[in-house]
Structure formats: C-alpha cells, structure tokens
Image: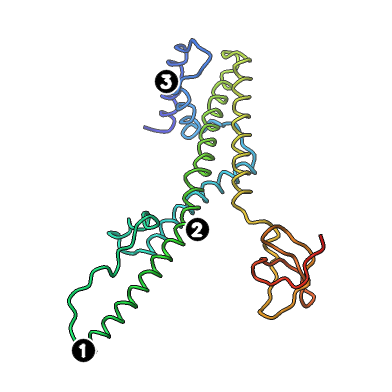
Amino acid sequence: MSVAGLKKQFHKATQCRVPLLNSSSVTFDLIILTASREKVGGAEGTKLDEDFKEMEKKVDVTSRAVLDIMTKTTEYLQPNPASRAKLSMISTMSKMRGQEKGPGYPGGERLALMDASEAMKELGEVKDALDIEVKQNFIDPLQNLHDKDLKEIQHHLKKMEGRRLDFDYKKKRQGKVQDEEIKQALEKFDESKEIAEQSISTCWRATSPPRWRTGELGFKEGDVITLTNQIDDNWYEGMINGQSGFFPINYVDILVPLPH
C-alpha cells in the first residue's frame, strides 16, 4: 500500500472511532493512533525544547552504557559463564579451602607441592577479595543507578510522552473537544515534563563528582603542604610550590592544624 493510501486508511479509522467517545478521556487506541499518524502521516506534535531533548538522549545513552559496563566488568572478572553466577553471591558465601588433606608422601616433592598449594590458596583469596571489592564498590552502585534512578526517569519520560500524545490529539480536534479538556491535557503534560526534568537533574547531581574534585593537588611523600581550608570531613585545600589544590585528609599527617 502506498503512503497516500495508508494516510487515507488512518483518516478513515479516525472518523469511525471518534464518534464512539462519550467521556472526557481519550482511549488508549486513539493515543496509539495519534503516535502512528505522527510517524507515518507526518502529523506535527508538540515540540519539546532542545535542552530537554538533549537530557532525554543523555538518559538513554547513560542507561545503555551503565548496563554495558556492568556486563563487561562481570565478564572480565569471570570469563567462564558457568562460574559467573558465583560473583553475585560471593559476598555471602563461606570459603571452604584447605580443610581436607589427602594422605601425604615423603620427600621434597611433598613440601614443594604443599608450598605451591598454599600459594594458590592465597592467590584464590586475593582474587575473591578483588571480586568482592569490585562488586560492592563498582558493580552494585551501577546496578542501583540503573535499576532505581534511571528506571524512574524512564518511567516519567514514558508518562510524559503519553500525556503529550493525549494533548496533541485533543488540540487537533479543537472545536469538537471542549476547551477545558484541552487545558487540562496541557496542564498534565507540563506537569509530567517538569517532574521528568527534576528527576533527571537530581540524578545528575547525585552521580556527578563535585566540581572541586577536578583541582586535586599533586604531591609526593615528604612534601610539606600549607593548609588553607578544610572542604569537608575527608578533604583539605592547600598549597605547595606555588600550586593550590585539594587532597584527601587520610593521605597526610597534620603538623599544624587549621585554626578553628
């Protein structure tokens, strides 16, 4: 079917279904029809400002990137798919290592094998500790971001899109739809858009590092830093060799504390 013929069929469907509406709400079918006419028929919908569309793109890219990073990190730590499930439970598993000893045999080979076994045991413990550290401090925060914050943002964006389609449909039928209904649809759309903007901004502020972190001070062991300010419980501001910047409190020993 040609595009012109498809437009005609959409027009007929609209003419047939609209008289069935007896309430102030728009049916889900008509909202879907409005979205389809925008995509296929070229109907122009309510324009969103460029800043908001840019935020939508960032949310989508961030969500896909976070999921990809979590997947790739897990695969890197444990390439074997059959053993990968262990990583999600490793923080609560009790390690059963070296508890059973087989019958020994005399000779230096026995001692060498015992040393090698002990070394492999220690390597395994280091590997497990690394897995736990990465999971707790890297994968889990990303998982929380993906499953809560980003999912909530996508929910608000989806709700906003549904209300936009509802408003556009009623606006195009101005004269057949009461002005009060159109006004209410616009108010709901604006409300959803504002909530979506707020949730995106809150997420960015919570996950972005403080601006002052970009000015960290470089120094080496034995350097003497002149303290100028305490940023918070974990960071100082200071000067060394004419350079000013920020550094962690636990990296230094305080010789002369800042005056209170």
Who's the residue at 56% across and 29% down the image?
164
Who's the residue at 42% across and 15% down the image?
16
Is the Cβ of the residue at disc 3 closer than 8 Å to that at disc 1? Answer: no
How far across and how far down the image is residue 166, in percent?
A: 53, 24
Q: Callout 2: few (<14), some (14-19), or many (20+) C-alpha neighbours within 10 Å?
A: few
Q: Is residue 227 above or below residue 150?
A: below
Q: Nearer the viewer, mark 3 or mark 1?
A: 1
- The label shown at residue 13 is 3
Who's the residue at 48% across and 47% down the image?
146
Secondary structure under badge 1?
loop
Front in this rendered view, residue 156 or 221: 221
How far across and how far down the image is residue 235, in percent?
A: 69, 62
Secondary structure under badge 2?
helix
Q: Which residue is mark 2?
A: 137
Mark nearer the N terminus (1 vs 2): 1
Q: Which residue is mark 1?
A: 107
